[in-house]
Image (tube, rainbow, N blue to C red):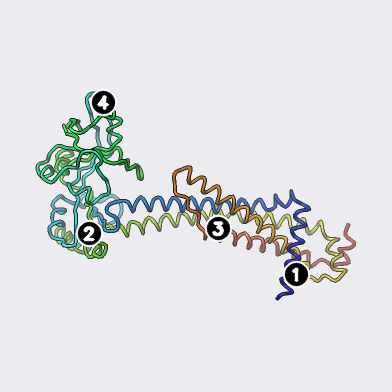
Amino acid sequence: MIKLFDELAEFFSQAIETMWENKTRSFLTMLGVVIGVFAVITLVAIGEGAKRYVYDEVSSFGTGSTYMEVHPGKDLGPPSFTDKLTYQDAEEIARQCPDVANVDPRLYGNGEIRYGNQKMDIPFIMGVSYKYTSVFSHKVVTGRFFNKPEEDTRKKVCVVGNKIVTELLAGSNPIGERVKINSKSFTVIGVFEDKGAFFGFDYNKVVVIPITAAEQLFDTKNIVEIGISAKSDDVVHKAKDEIYQLLLKRHKKENFRIDTQEESLSLVNNILSFLTLVIGGIASISLLVGGIGIMNIMLVSVNERIREIGIRKSVGATRRDIFLQFLVESVVISMLGGTVGIILGVGVSMGMMRLIGITPVVSAWSAALAYFVSIIVGVVSGVYPAMRAAALDPVEALRYE
């Protein structure tokens, strides 16, 4: 075993010398591996960073792990006309489910908001209950949120996103100002915190009104979803079962679904992990191209060094020695290419993620896997040229011009 290591160390040293003598060709040979490893690490890192970003954004919804939502329709996708949830469903959940802490029925629409001669199109006008800020992490930083008496009496009050204040109200104090939402007059009583956008939903450009007022504004009794928080992490699944049994009894059929935060995060994680693997797999194709380049150059190297091979065999080198010499050269090229690719991949991916505002995430597994694959590429690419070199007849090799 010690003898084998000594031989490999000698072949490694020879490989470095050979590469140094042919610096330009060696660089161009390993360039394919460099690009392949760089692409794998960069794309996987960006994919992992995006996954972490989306995961954190979804986790910030609601009240964390106790949060769940009830939607009309049994499966994902738009519900049928017969799949409906009502304000009364939400009231009964709050009244009859002992492990439920807060219930927030919601109704969405769109329209415009006017202030004097100024107007703004609003993609999301949300009708919610007074429990909204207890169920969903959306804080009011100026003014206040509406209360239960205002909800019960269909009071026309609203809480707005900060973009509406800056763009429509010219940044002035909006509390107490009268605005018109779809031609109906409302009083501004609060402003939400800066929450940003997620999947096209700009929370800074939202208008929230009591759900009872929204039923009048949009002329409907059907709510879009019910946000719910359980009393603790330990009773989430118990609360879900209580809601399920109650709605099944009320609706007479399972025309609704209940999504817990845990299930939503698991779904998001599975989708993004699959996409990351696909991206990494596509990028790894460039490693195959790099391997073909190494094999091609090694075959050229064998042809250029036929006389050298003949001389070595004539002074006692075995087929095994020749085979290992060329195989080690191929592996050294791929190892150096993999090392450079990792350094570039880590540096560039971290820089790109910081530039686009995503927390840098460089997966150790992707770097290790890319490096391992680059070595395998070197081995596979070097086997055939090494076998061809080892099989040369020493007499014919010495005669070769």
Mark found first going from the N terminus, 4 or 3: 4
Q: Element under label 3? A: helix
Disc 3: which residue: 367
Q: Amino acid at mark 4?
A: Gln
Q: Residues within 10 Å of mark 2 (few under 14, many from 20)?
A: many
Q: Secondary structure at mark 4?
A: strand
Depth order, front residue of 315/259: 315
Residue 373, quarter of picture: bottom right
Relative height, residue 161 to residue 374 (above, below): above
The location of residue 264, given as percent across then percent down, is: 33, 56
Direction from residue 79 to residue 265 in the image, left or right: right
Residue highlighted by disc 1 = 7
Q: What residue sits 73% from the left and 63% below the top?
A: 12
Q: Which residue is mark 2?
A: 230
Structural distance between the alpha carbons of marks 4 and 2: 42 Å
Nearer to us of marks 1 and 4 is: 1
As drawn, the label of residue 118 is: 4
